[in-house]
Amino acid sequence: MKHLEGVTRPQQIRALSLSTLAFTTCFAVWTIFSIIGIKIKQDLGLNETQFGILVATPILTGSISRIFLGIWTEQFGGRRVFSLLMLVTAACVFLLSYVESYAMFLVAALGVGLAGGSFIVGIAYTSYWFEKERQGTALGIFGAGNAGAAVTNFAAPFLLLALGWEQTAVVYAIVLSVVAVGFWVFSKEDPLTRSRRGQGGKATSAREQLAPLKHLQVWRFALYYFFVFGAFVALASYLPRYYVGAYDVSIAVAGSLAALYTLPASVFRALGGWMSDRYGARSIMYLTFIASLVCLFLLAYPETHYVVEGKEGQIAFSLAMPLWGVVVLTVLLGFFMSLGKAAVYKHIPVYYPENVGSVGGLVGMIGGLGGFFLPILFGAVLDLTGVWTSSYMVLFVLVAISLVWMHGAIRRMERARVPELGEERYRYLPELQEPAARYAAGKEAAGRDATGDAAPSRPGRQAEA
């Protein structure tokens, strides 16, 4: 990486710190409807589906805009795009305080959603400051800015009670404007953009940046992110309403309990980045999906009453998840999702180092769309079934599909690279068992021991990871 020549560690730390602060602020703005939306729902008399659409609308803009913002970041540099994006979003948040009708709320929410596009801008900007072997950790630290959702869940209920939702929006707009100005003043252009401009080179065209999107591998990464990030955003927005409706707690208590989920789902992303650097991103994805399935199965089990015939007559009992159990399980779910978020984005600069913005933008867009569609689906399924735990049932199915597809792809990849692995019918978790390279070496050594010569090898096609 020639563009990193002359880059010092303090410069990397400053760039990472500023981008993480900016992203944290943007994420807090992006999820503002998770709190003020509850009050708006009460004022306008919205049903569950309408509330789900309101909460999800900012997610739609934040998701779709990512692919364009990723391209613009590679063309114009993260410093310019990040600063301008925050100022435009701050203006939209301020105008939100003047809205009165549901239709106009949806229009305003589209503008507020631009804050979500900051993720891909920061990913590209941050990755260009670090070497490959440190990118997983750096991007994990940056991604901890998801803690902005916890900031909103903690602080917004008290602002809402003290100032009303209109002035809460004004406060958010002012804070975001201050951060935008501070980022522009104290940040520097990333080394890759600075090097390209110094050499008089042209930015990569949009067509070239979008070329990797033809690979199925990219879309598989996007599905993973649909859960680990999209479902995170969906639950961060939906949990306050879930706690208020299912357990009849106040908005302040519901926000605090939801923050207990969003905090570990954000801050441990840095740990996920380090673990992906150390143990491999695929291993972390296996851990994420398997642990999430367990948590979601327990969360999805609805309150159930049983009557059995006993020796002396009928015996009635019931199974129900208490509030503290839901809180504990969501905290665990959030922790494993944070590891998965870092693991997904560890893949991108490794496989597509010249297209981090466009590939990361697509993955981020699909993942963000999970934050748009899932709250609507949660509300619709709840209206249809009347079962509060139906949202977790939806997520359980999503994780199961992702795990099966990932495992099948890895098995095909290993068999293509090392055909001898096809003989191992019980090699079910290749990333957690003996790596393919060592396995092949062991088979070759065994062939020499038996025949005095190397075991014959068969050519295999290099498959996608």
Image: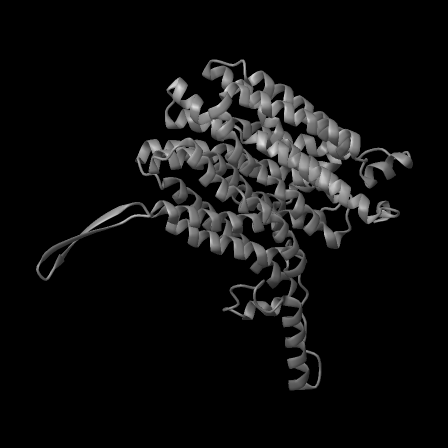
The answer to whether any part of residue 312 appears in the image is: yes
Locate residue 251, reporting x and y percent. 42, 31
- What residue is at 68 percent from the left and 51 percent from the top? 137
**Quadrant where the C terminus is found in the figure:** bottom right
Q: Is residue 211 among the parts visible in the rendering?
A: no
Q: How is the image coloured?
A: one colour
Q: In the drawing, does residue 447 fall left or right of residue 8? A: left
**Which residue: 40% across, 43% down?**
392
Q: Residue furthest left?
A: 312
Residue depicted at 66% across the width and 33% down the height: 118
Position of residue 252 relative to residue 404, above or below, is above
Which residue is nearer to you in this view: 218 or 390? Answer: 390
User: Residue 103 location, x and y as percent?
Assistant: 48, 16
- How many marks on residues? 0
Residue at (30% x, 35% y) in the render: 386
Occupied quadrant, residue 378: top left
The image shows residue 281, relative to residue 13, as above or below, that is: below
Measured from the top left, where is residue 199 in percent x and y?
91, 37
Left or right position of 464 against 99: right
Instruction: Depth check: give the residue in front, 193 or 38.
Output: 38
Q: Nearer the viewer, residue 323 or 435?
A: 323
Q: Residue furthest right?
A: 199
63 sits to left or right of 138:
left
Q: Is residue 460 above or below residue 86?
A: below
In x, y percent, where is residue 338?
A: 56, 48
Would residue 282 be found to the left or right of residue 51 on screen?
Answer: right
Residue farthest front in this picture: 162
Instruction: Tell me where residue 148 sits by quadrant.
Output: top right
